[in-house]
Amino acid sequence: MKFVSIVIASKSDYEIMVECTETLKKFGVPYELIVSSAHRSPERTKNYIQIAEEKGAQVFIAAAGMAAHLAGTVAAHTTKPVLGVPIDSGSLKGEDALLSTVMMSEGMPVGTLAIGKAGAVNAGYLAIEIMALQDDELKVKLQEDRISKAKKVELDSSEIETIL
């Protein structure tokens, strides 16, 4: 079965990443979530990636705060797409996690999203878009979602002020 694998560095990251799981659920995309730290449990992380790939993981989402080496660790052990979500933690409010996630070595790409909730939601959407490349039903659901979002922000002429 094809699914999205979400790896979070600690249980406290779940408060943010639940937003990602809700996005995936909304589209009926199967996912698996595991807590595994690049620093505290590197072997567990490495072994999990292999097991997840064997089970059908198509996209990995890695979320971590502070030093945030989790996405890079995942990327080092797979050729599947890896999306990184920096978590707002520590004294630098997630900026350290953002830089650690986005500044990957050449040839080890990690698609880096925004810090926190917006990043978690968008990681879910981006994973869905990747999976929709080979799933026409999912592609239609995404198109319908975009149309409904566009309708919420359409302007009518009474909302436009012109100053000449």
Image (spheres, rainbow, N blue to C red):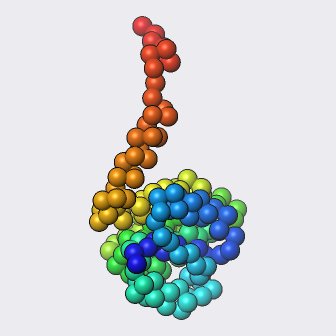
- Nearest the viewer among 61 and 32 is 32
**Quick check: 146 above or below 117?**
above
For image coordinates 59% across by 70% down, the residue present is 64
Tell me: 38 left or right of 89: left
Q: Please state if 134 lies on the left or on the right of 32 as rendered.
A: left
Quadrant showing the C terminus:
top left
Q: Position of residue 18 (x, y in %)?
A: 61, 63
Kindly identify the residue that appears in the image at 32 percent across and 63 percent down. Answer: 135
Across and down, in percent, residue 158 comes to: 49, 14
Q: Position of residue 1 (x, y in %)?
A: 40, 78
How many numbered badges does the structure rendering display?
A: 0
Residue at the image position 46 percent from the left and 88 percent from the top: 51
The extreme top residue here reads 164
Q: Where residue 19 sits in the image (x, y, percent)?
A: 59, 59
Is any part of residue 87 visible from this angle?
Answer: no
Q: Is residue 164 above or below residue 99?
A: above
Q: Which residue is drawn at the image coordinates 34% and 78% (left, top)?
A: 79
Camera sees residue 139: yes
Side (left or right) of 9 relative to 131: right
Give the camera-side residue of 47 and 136. 136
